Amino acid sequence: MSIAAASPAALADAVGTRIAGDWFEIDQARIQAFADATCDHQWIHLDEARAAAGPFGATIAHGYLTLSLIPHLTAGHLDVAGTAMVVNYGLDRVRFLQPVTSGSRVRAVSELTGVQPGPQGVRAAVTVTIEIEGADRPALIAETVALFVPEA
């Protein structure tokens, strides 16, 4: 299931629509790989013994790791026909609300919150909430913006 539109211009009709994705596990190997890629080797992410005695009882994913998974977690959430390409336009707001412990499963809930036509195409604002399975609070909320360029 996805938020579908017949064209970039038709996205306006879908404002307010929400969709949830599939659960995805963030394991220690992924956390280690992200630490290596970003040179962020803080003990809270990598030292399992020390982190077990720390404030979260386990290692935690980097906030930026969880944020960087948004494209994967939201893949297929918007299905817009008549689009030549989609460009990541950026983020307007990001808040990290709760850490994701190693082995947790997360999923994205996307809500199309705004559409703005422009000379290059249609900018779509999507509020993405990354939920943690079994948790009362989400890991993060991000307001993403994508540019949908119509076919010529």
Image (cartoon, rainbow, N blue to C red):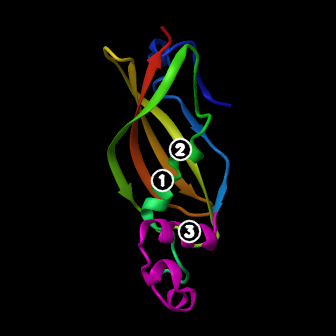
Tell me if residue 20 comes above or below residue 1 in the rendering.
below
Q: Residue at x 52, y 13 (%)?
A: 7
The CA span between labels 2 and 3 is 18 Å
Q: Nearer the viewer, residue 19 or 50?
A: 50
Q: Which SS class for mark 2?
A: helix
Q: Give the residue pinned by disc 2.
A: 71
Local secondary structure at mark 3: helix
- Amino acid on which the number 2 mark rests in the picture: Pro
* Residue 138 visible here: no
Q: Which residues are magenta?
A: 26-55
Q: In the displayed structure, does residue 64 sit left or right of residue 2? A: left
User: Marks 2 and 1: in contact by CB < 8 Å?
Assistant: yes
Farthest residue toward the top?
152
- Determine which of the numbered discs, if any, sits on residue 93 in the image: none
Residues at marks 1 and 2, CA–CA distance in whole angstroms: 7 Å
Q: Which residue is mark 1?
A: 68
